[in-house]
Image (cartoon, helix red, strand yellow):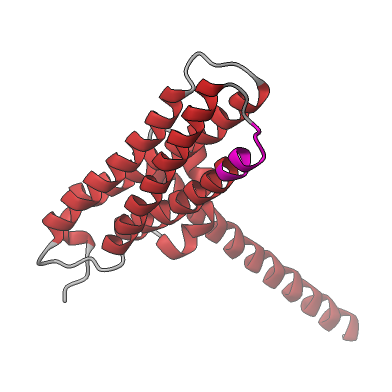
């Protein structure tokens, strides 16, 4: 009798463990589906999924939360690139007059982009149903300008060679791709419209 009871208890424990694992698996898959669905509107989907995966459980299927997360990540990336460019300039890591001029222009471009991304994040933190269309217009303008600044930086180094130039181009290119994804998610929010926002 005791053996039978022990077997029932063991079976119950095993069943409980299996159920818990199944719930965790489904939850994990749900989070993965959230980020994949959100990133489906972006041009660089793999980069989008990789950079925004940690927001899956909090953003869920909210276009406004995904846009905010994307702009926040983009701002962090832009700041990182700006610090890298300033360090490169300080330590004379780029040789040649043309390259040094391009580096100086690039630093200015990223400082402008950071300002534009700060403004964009400010909009997304204070979305309003009454001014939504105006806010979306401002958001598109600033994110587009941030993207243009990244492209302008790259244009300055076009045709130039060298290991440091290549490394710089790769870092800036990644930042522009992340910015492009943020713009796509902002456009998704604008297209979704007021339904995606809570009523005041």
Residue in the picture at 15% in, 60% down: 132
Q: Main secondary structure of the magenta part?
A: helix
Residue 63 on image: x %, y %? 31, 55
Residue farthest along the right direction in this orientation: 3
- Quarter of the image with the C terminus is bottom left
Q: Residue 1's image quarter?
A: bottom right
Q: Is residue 44 left or right of residue 53?
A: left
Image quadrant in which you'd find residue 120: bottom left
Q: Is residue 61 left or right of residue 177?
A: left
Task: Name the residue furthest bottom.
Answer: 2
- Look at the image and tell me whether residue 136 can be seen: yes
Magenta span includes 31: no
Q: Nearer the viewer, residue 67 or 87?
A: 87
Residue 121 image position (x, y, % from top left): 34, 59
Specify start and end residues of the magenta stretch as a single range. 86-93
Q: Which residue is located at x 54 percent, y 57 percent? A: 54
């Amino acid at each position: 009798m005791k053996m039978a009871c022990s077997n029932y208890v063991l079976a119950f424990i095993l069943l409980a463990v299996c159920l818990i694992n199944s719930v965790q698996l489904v939850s994990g898959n749900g989070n993965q589906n959230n980020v994949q669905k959100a990133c489906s509107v972006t041009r660089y989907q793999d980069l989008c999924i990789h950079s925004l995966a940690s927001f899956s459980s909090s953003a869920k299927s909210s276009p406004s939360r995904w846009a905010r997360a994307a702009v926040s990540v983009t701002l962090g990336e832009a700041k990182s690139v700006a610090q890298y460019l300033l360090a490169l300039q300080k330590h004379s890591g780029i040789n040649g007059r043309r390259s040094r001029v391009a580096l100086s222009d690039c630093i200015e471009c990223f400082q402008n982009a950071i300002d534009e991304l700060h403004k964009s994040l400010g909009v997304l933190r204070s979305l309003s149903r009454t001014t939504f269309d105006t806010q979306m217009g401002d958001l598109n303008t600033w994110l587009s300008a941030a993207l243009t600044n990244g492209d302008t930086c790259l244009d300055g180094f076009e045709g130039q060679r060298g290991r440091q130039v290549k490394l710089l181009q790769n870092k800036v290119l990644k930042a522009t791709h992340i910015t492009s994804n943020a713009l796509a998610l902002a456009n998704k929010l604008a297209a979704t419209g007021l339904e995606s926002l809570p009523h005041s």
